[in-house]
Amino acid sequence: MRAFALSLTVTLAAFPAFANKVYISNEKGNDITVLDSETLEVIATFPAGNRPRGITISPDGKELYVCASDDDTVRVFETETYTETHTLPSGPDPELFVLHPSGNPLYIANEDDNLVTIVDVVTHRVLAEVPVGVEPEGMAISPDGAFVVNTSETTNMAHFIDTATSQIVANVLVDQRPRYAQFTSDGKLLFVTAEIGGTVAVVDVATKEVIHKIGFEIPGVLPEAIQPVGLKITQDGSRIYVALGPANRVAVIDGATFEVMDYLLVGQRVWQLAFTPDERFLFTTNGNSNDVSVIDVAAGEVIRSVPVGQQPWGIVVAPD
Amino acid sequence: MKRLLIAALLLTTPALAEGSGDPTWPCIQRKQPHLSIGQLWPGPPPDAAAAHLAQRPDIAALAQVLEQRRLPMDEAEVQIAAFAKGASAAELTALFVAVFDRIDAYRSRIMAGVARYAEKQTALSDQIEARRAEMARLSAAAAPDFDKIDAEEERLDWDVRIFTDRQAQLTYVCETPVILEQRAFALGRAIAAHLATPTPVP
């Protein structure tokens, strides 16, 4: 038995990762590409309505949510069969959304009418609409579910919404065209990317103040090509990865010092990022080269580019 | 029919003003006058030595072949692989510099063409406005000269037709710089794949 246990351990050590499905929304192809996170092969493609962008998955991995921006709805797919089971009311032009850590509700940014729509994913009903700044875009939720943050592209703010009251409790001014926001897993810091400003704001969640701004400078790249968009943070907060849009690079940032350590060349117009649950790989969607780059996180290297659909935009990895 | 064309014109005219606010840049895509090498090449920016080496006849000739969009990427990759056998990192870098310089120069010419296209459309739009004003003036006369009105209407119809036809090509016109950037990126990636280990940017 011990020998068996030992051999099992060895096997597990040799193959530490589960294969997870990786779902990529193709904004122009109007479909979803499914990758296998171990073989890095495309295993399926299925239609997803008009202009699919934001994409997320339920904590149990059974339901896939897709913002079909030009259909003004959120489409819900069964993750095994890829069949559409229903839609959720989203308000006009849904672009990005965030799911409560419990799996319900869903908080959706409506770019065209300056609202965040809160939808119950079980009853399929709108619970509330929260007026925010002009052109709401990025969405983040604190790990304890207490705050939802929405960024507004034109107002250049991160709005903190109290999830208990659906009221805005703080507005934090950041740089021009904030695109994406994410909390650290301990809930203490919020990172907000600014596409035109070319920076990432580090916000202290307790005081709601910007405590640091991360700038970017890449030798041989014109500053206007550096446009921070998607962002992801490791569970332990030690590394932050920022997609720099048409610079075609992902910045690797030290979570303790906020210093940029490296700029990895990925694909063209890199947009969104997603880790595998074990954080072995980080995937990037590259809108202009129509592929997904695979970063080996430990090695800090791009190991593969996988062709997907037309203009890949959003990406989510299924939980274990 | 004329009403329809004018309606189409009214619908399409604002597209000229969209995007950057630059009247000579009619595209939705952000105007990016030049590509930068760091967007396409993983290593440190090539130096003057690489630029000099890029002029070596065999490297320049290969770059000229690779640049052609009619050469499929898989065939380009075969040619790059053949060159890479025995080529040093400096020679591979020089090949990319040669490709980059050619594509960026061509892309700049295309972008100048886009600007001329936009200027022509603006001029035509002004001419259409003038013809419409002239028609309104002729129609408002106490004894309208219907022959003159008909002639002016015909000229107006032609101008509107040319304008809308040209406008329909806008998507293609605007996508050309993007397609060239894609080509440059794909070639950069294919050449860089033959470097032993990518040099991280400091």
Image (tube, rainbow, N blue to C red):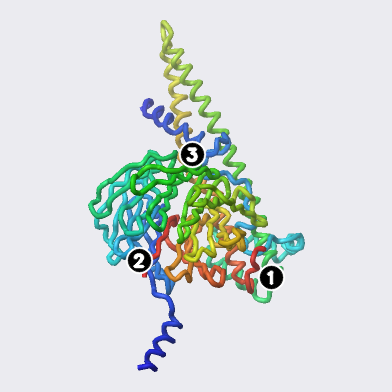
Q: Chain of mark 2?
A: A
Q: Amino acid at mark 1?
A: Ala
- Which residue does the image show at 61% across and 63% down from the upper left? A262
What residue is disc 3 on? A155
- Element under disc 3: loop
Q: Looking at this view, is B135 or B87 the one in front?
A: B87
Q: How far across and down, in percent of the image, does residue A140 sit?
A: 42, 53
What residue is disc 2 on? A44
Q: Looking at this view, is B182 or A102 the one in front?
A: A102
Q: Amino acid at mark 3?
A: Thr
Q: How far across and down, in percent of the image, does residue B66 sit?
A: 61, 62
- Element under disc 2: strand
Between the residue at mark 1 and the residue at mark 2, the CA separation in whole angstroms equals: 38 Å
- Which residue does the image show at 45% across and 15% down from the upper left? B148
What residue is disc 1 on? B89
Q: Chain of mark 1?
A: B
Q: Quadrant of the N terminus of chain B?
A: top left
Q: Chain of mark 3?
A: A
Comparing labels 3 and 1, the label whose residue is closer to the camera: 3
